[in-house]
Image (cartoon, helix red, strand yellow):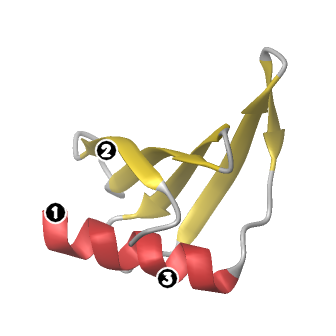
Amino acid sequence: MKPYELNEMIIDDDFASEEYVTVEFSYNQKEYSITFKKADLEIINSWVFENGTSLPVNLSEEMVELIREDIKKRI
């Protein structure tokens, strides 16, 4: 069982130079967002949403890998 719940995935493919994938997910009763480059799934940025604001967040490499695998299956 996954430790997170994927809520939404957006693929931005209208950019001239790069394509991006943004996933929004719930984990430990908090909402998160990570944006990856679509080509190699390198992290561009990651955020946690708390108290009406967004803050940068560092997730464990294990969590990031689980999300990458989930994205690969959906693309």
Q: Nearer the viewer, residue 59 or 37?
A: 59
Q: Earlier in the sequence, mark 3 or mark 2?
A: 2
In the rendered image, is residue 39 in sight?
Answer: no
Q: Amino acid at mark 3?
A: Glu
Name the residue tied to disc 3. 65
Q: Secondary structure at mark 2?
A: strand
| Crowdedness near tag 3: few (<14), some (14–19) or many (≥20) residues, C-alpha within 10 Å | few
Q: Residue 24 at x, y = what percent?
A: 47, 42
| Mark 3–mark 2 distance (CA, rounded to whole Å) | 16 Å
CB of mark 1 within 8 Å of CB of mark 2? Answer: yes
The residue under label 2 is 9
Question: On the image, which quarter does residue 54 sit in?
Answer: top right
Identified at 23% across, 74% down, the residue is 72
> Depth check: 18 or 68 in front?
68
User: What residue do we see at 70% from left, 45% from top?
Assistant: 47
Q: What residue is pinned by disc 1?
A: 74
